Image (cartoon, rainbow, N blue to C red):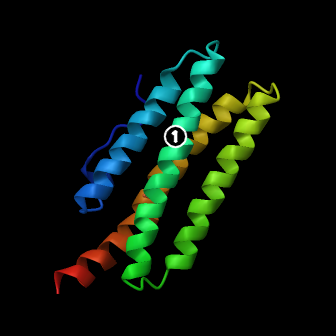
Amino acid sequence: MKLIEWNESLSVSVDSFDMEHKELIKMINEFNSSEKSKIDKIFEILDGLIHYSDFHFKNEERFMKQSNYKFYEEHKAQHERFISTINKLKKQYIEGRPFVYTKINRLLKTWLIEHIKKCDKKYAEHLIKTYKH
Ligand code: FEO
């Protein structure tokens, strides 16, 4: 079962970022549907997710900085907190705390949806205004 389904309410109206969000959602769903017993596979997906999140965040940050977005630092800090939390949870998982799997799933779902709706949409509006003139 899919944990998250992309729909128009998640669109930031910037195609490249919508595509990257869709890719992140795909990876989150893959993590959610992976068999808990296949530890190597779980870590492979999680590492891919961390790596792709970092790539996506840097893309957004580049545009925010170039366009002098006033909430750039705040937004960047959110990205950094997410990466740091997910790495911390991954470490706990490696140390043998299986309940962390559920915690990771919950974080992936709630954080991404909220972040897109509350923060990404805000910078996207700014980008659209800035580059349409
Ligand atoms: Fe799409 Fe700010 O992450």
Q: Is residue 93 above or below residue 79?
A: above
Residue ID for mark 1: 49
* Residue 85 shown left or right of residue 17 in the figure: right
Image quarter of the N terminus: top left
Q: Nearer the viewer, residue 1 or 124?
A: 124
Q: Is residue 96 above or below residue 11?
A: above
Where on the picture, by quarter, is residue 65? bottom left
Q: Is residue 121 above or below residue 46?
A: below
Q: Position of residue 73 (x, y in %)?
A: 56, 77
Residue located 66% across and 29% down the image = 101
SS at badge 1: helix
Where on the picture, by quarter, is residue 12? bottom left
Residue located 46% across and 53% down the image = 55
* Residue 99 shown left or right of residue 82 in the figure: right
* Residue 73 shown left or right of residue 56 in the figure: right
Q: Position of residue 68 (x, y in %)?
A: 41, 86
Q: Position of residue 133 (x, y in %)?
A: 17, 87
Where is ligand 1, by quadrant? bottom left
Badge 1 amino acid: Leu
Residue 11 visible somewhere in the drawing:
no
